[in-house]
Amino acid sequence: MRPDGDQAALPPGRDWTGWLFVLLAAASIGLVLYASDSSAERALAARPHPIAPPADVVPEVLPMEFAPVAQDDARAANARIALITKGFTAARPFIYVGSGDAKARARDCLAAAMLYEAGDDAKGQQAVGQVIINRARHPAFPKSICGVVFQGSERVTGCQFTFTCDGALNRRYLDAAWQRARNNADLMLSGSTYPPVGLATHYHTDWVRPYWSDSLEKIAIVDTHLFFRWPGYWGTPGAFRGAVSGGDGPVAKLAAISPLHAMALGLPSELATGVDADATVGEARVVVGAGEATGRDTIYTQLDRRAAPESFVTTALRLCGDKSYCKFMGWTNPVLKPDSDAMSDTQRAAMTFSYLRDDKAGFEKALWNCSEYKRDDVRQCMKR
């Protein structure tokens, strides 16, 4: 029977029970596939709407820690987050109130973040710079440019910008790239803005999932980077009224690339030179062997007598890495180089160079044996 000539009747002997069997089989297959999905991916699929922090309680700043998910799963989960366009506001121009060396140090902190976070890309650098300025104006963050950039950098994990605690600063960019970043930073400290990211205070690449991302609103996408703000009052223009310090001080971790930071710490400015990130840094030759390092925080090293004395600082910074405490001692005379702190007076007097970093005490100092290498500043000479 074909009513209206369009639908065929079921063949004789068949009824709807056969179709029911097919549907049940399909449902069973679906359940098996669902069960085979990773629990992490299923958890990422459900995202509650961010809860706005109370207007009278400054929100907590969480560290940049990532959920253990595969890149493809992270991309899929990030894509499911709705882009919020309601209430989008561009940031007001920012003018740094300090001058002289303080402004130059703030510029170098901002430039380092822009370069190491976004690479030699003007658009990406401006986006990063805008987030840093937004943070400096927000009561949840430090009130200086350098303070914002290096917040949490004393810890291996917990830093706000990963380049400050993952060893990235041990790599160097060409002078031209560093200068371009400094120029871009100068513009942003003099009123230039990057409107596409609005009042964003957080960002991450689309292939990772920071634990804080579900508590924020996604408001902008720039290439592979996603930008976020707090929901509620803390993401509105009224929250960005904090006075930003104009007195940025030196940062030890920038001494190797910024002469202004190096000199303010009593370190030679000659060590701050731009080097290709993929090239070998010119430095004192380190003789690696038994007894070079006697402990996690103390390093004993033979130095090359033919090397420039300024290069000893570069060597110390490289070997100390991101340790919060590090004692580095070097000798050009291999016979007198000790293997432990139990050194003789003769060995101590023969020490060529020493470097000590103690982040908890806020101390960092490099000293030379001035009977071996003359220094223009006697404060850089070891006491005999």
Image (spheres, grey):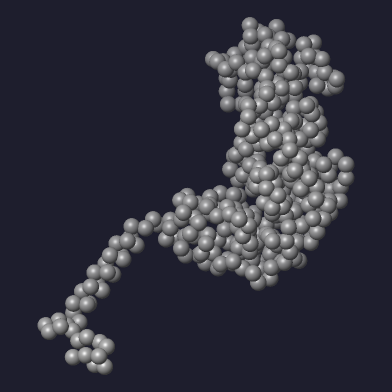
Residue 10, placed above or below residue 37: below
Q: Quadrant of residue 241?
A: bottom right
User: Which quadrant of the figure has residue 287?
Assistant: top right
Residue drawn 28% across and 70% down? 27
The C terminus - image quarter: top right
Determine the residue positioned at 26% across, 93% down. 4
Quadrant of the drawing holding the N terminus: bottom left
Question: Of 296 and 40, which appears nearest the observer?
Answer: 40
Above-or-below relation of 256 to 121: above
Using the image, determine if residue 346 lies above or below residue 327.
above
Against 217, is 324 above or below?
above
Find residue 55 and report its horizontal and vertical position in percent: 69, 67
Estimate the x, y position of residue 170 in percent, counting from the top left.
64, 33
> In the figure, is residue 57 to the left or right of 49?
right
Do we see residue 341 in this rendering? Answer: no
Q: Residue at x 71, y 16 (%)?
A: 307
Residue 280 seen from this side: yes
Residue that appears at 80% across and 21% down: 380
